[in-house]
Every structure is written in C-alpha cells, then in structure tokens.
Image: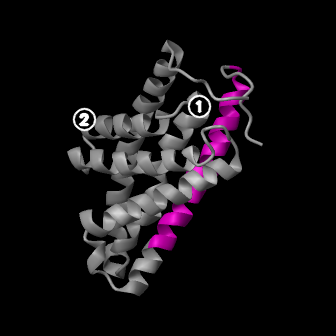
Amino acid sequence: MAINSRWHLQSVIEVAIISIFLGGFFVFSDWLYTLVYGLVTPLGLAPFVGDALFGLWCMGGSLAFMVVRLPGAALISEIVGALLESMFGGTFGIVALSAGFFQGIGTELGFAAFKYKKFNFASLTLAAVLSTIVTFTSALFIHGYIHFQLGLLLGLFITRLVSNLIFSVGVVTLVYKLFNRTGLSTDRRIK
C-alpha cells in the first residue's frame, strides 16, 4: 500500500487522538522515571534510568506514523505529545518539547530513509535506531553526557537503544496489530 500523499481531516484527528493519549502516557512515564530514579540512586545506577525508560517516550512517533502514514506524523505526534505532557504536569515541564522534537526528527529520518513507503519491522527498526542516535547526540549537550567517560557513554547508548527497540518496535508492533483488529484501519499490516 502506498503512502497517503496529503493530510486529511481523518489523519489530523488520528494524530490528535494519539498525541492526547501520549501526553497522558508521557506523564505516567515521568512518574515512573522519578520513582525508579529514587530507588536506584543509592545503587549508583541513576544515570541509566532515563535511557532504560527512553523507549516509553519515543514510541509515539512510530505509532503515529504507522497509523497515519504521512511524512511529519511522527514529528508532530512527538511534539504535541510532549507539549501535552508538560501541560498535564509532567516532571520535565516545557523542556520535554526539545526531547519531543529530537525524538520526532530521529523517527522521521528512519521512515524517510524508506521514502515513507515501508511500514514494517525494518522501517520501525531503522526509525528506532536513528531516533536513538539523534536523541543521544542531543543528550551529549543538553544533559551534559559529553562530560561522561567513554565506558559510561557506551553503556548509556546501548541501554537507550535496547529500550527504544523494545518499545518503538516491539510494543508499537503489538499495539498496531491490536489497532488493525479493531477494523478502524484499512489494509495496514506490519509484515
């Protein structure tokens, strides 16, 4: 099935619904982050918490693109979800917008590499890998990762990548298949 070439009202509504859901889900993810951070800080594992949970914040763009299949869907969904996260009282406040931007850009690059024509495991995986690279690069400067030793950087990157693959590929695939079973979508199967 080819990609839609234009946004329609149905596409806007679908992205809006996904973004609203994601905004609330991101707040839950923020609370989970705060809880886990508090629990593992005495063990010296605090730097890994955000990267271990990273995929929770990044899967929205992939899900939006898989449902709508339009260039920009991942970016818009991540930014709107992050905006709503901050409006709903998320832990990270308005700073979440920069995270949403980088998550969306990285995900868009993955789908763009396939010219927005592949809606499968390979495109989801590339989107997850590229969003990991883009967001990790931004974390070097925004979150001060640039000051960490190489071994810690490598550990954080691998943790972030695995989290993103689990959530942005594995969970998105499951959610998407459930969405297809509702009959709300047209022939949109992940192969």
**Secondary structure at numbered mark 1:** loop
Q: Position of residue 172 (x, y in %)?
A: 60, 44
Residue 167 in view in this figure: no
* Residue bearing mark 2: 87
| Amino acid at pointer 1 | Arg
Q: Which is more toward the observer, 45 or 117?
A: 117
Task: Tell me, yes or no, whether the two marked residues, 2 and 1, touch with CB atoms within 8 Å.
Answer: no
Q: Which is more toward the observer, 180 or 45?
A: 180
Q: Which mark is residue 69?
A: 1
| Amino acid at pointer 2 | Met
**Secondary structure at numbered mark 2:** helix
Q: Is residue 164 magenta?
A: yes
Q: CA distance from mark 2 to mark 1?
A: 27 Å
- Determine the image quadrant of residue 182: top right
Q: Which residues are magenta?
A: 157-183
Residue plotted at (50% across, 49% down) = 109
In this rendering, the answer to whether 85 lies above or below 10 is below
- Determine the image quadrant of residue 27: top left
